[in-house]
Amino acid sequence: SFVLTQPPSVSVVPGQTATIACGGNNIGGISVHWYKQRPGQAPVLVVYDDSDRPSGIPERFSGSKSGNTATLTISRVEAGDEADFYCQVWDSIRHQGVFGGGTKLTVL
Amino acid sequence: EVQLLDSGGGLVQPGGSVRLSCAASGFAFPDFAMSWVRQAPGKGLEWVSTMSAADDSTNYADSVKGRFTISRDNSLNTLFLQMNTLRAEDTAVYFCAKHPGNSPYYFDYWGQGTLVSVSS
């Protein structure tokens, strides 16, 4: 089964770039997806299939993967980007969804 | 516009039951896999259950297997989660979520969530 590990928190100054890592055993061969969740709200998909963006998501949000680590990059960070971010994979062997523990992005 | 409206949550005693509903609109509900995801207070997201649209197969997290049942009524465009033998650790906001196709993958749309509190 997959276990996804994220840093609990990341801090960034407005205008700078934030990177959030998601490490997992054997995720190099499957797709990783990312969600943004503000307090009291439902999650929103921001990146799917490692690096694709849904319509309506700013180009400042990008995803990549190298080996068994996926990365969400947020360029030119704004105050409104402050939220929790979760990575996710689908385990097609065990037929279950798996989420990382989440990363709280703080905009200083 | 895709909309998912979660309902049915509330305060339930340990050992009790509750049924959650998710009313869907804005897409061809019968053609898409659907899931439930929960979030305990102050905690992260936890996948709970999925129902495929390809073959109506169902899958459950080990933590709820044997106690929860996912179902759908395609004539009503509604997803359900029957929750039995509830425990304090089932306290969470429950979100229904849509998948982009007839099999589970990522979650492209989410409901607003409904809170289930299990306490005496």
Image (spheres, coloured by chain):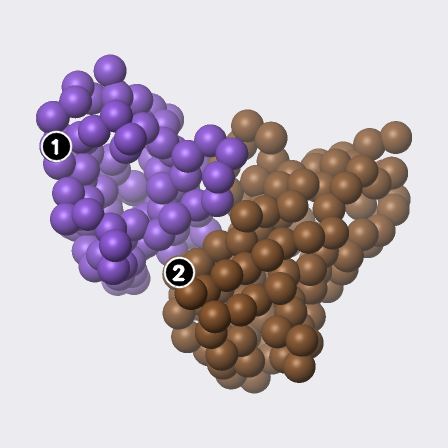
Chain colours: A purple, B brown
Residue B63 visible? The answer is: yes
Q: Chain of mark 2?
A: B
Q: Of the residues shown, which amino acid type is indicated by label 2?
A: Asp
Image vertical order of residue A99 relative to residue B120, above or below: below
- Give the side of residue A63 with respect to residue A8, left or right: left
Is B76 above or below relative to A59? below
Judge from the rendering whether residue A65 lies leftward or rightward of residue B29; answer left or right. Answer: left
Name the residue rendered at 29%, 50% in the picture: A46
Quadrant location of the N terminus of chain B? bottom left
Residue B108: which numbered mark, if any? Answer: 2
Residue of label 1: A76
Q: Which amino acid does the dot numbered 1 rest on?
A: Arg
Q: Quadrant of the C terminus of chain B?
A: top right
Quarter where residue B106 is shown: bottom left
Residue furthest to the top: A108
Q: Is residue B60 visible?
A: no
Find residue B109 and report its horizontal and vertical position in percent. 44, 58
Q: Position of residue B33 (x, y in %)?
A: 51, 72
Count residues near mark 2 (Cα–Cα under 10 Å), then give few for <14, some for 14-19, many for 20+.
some
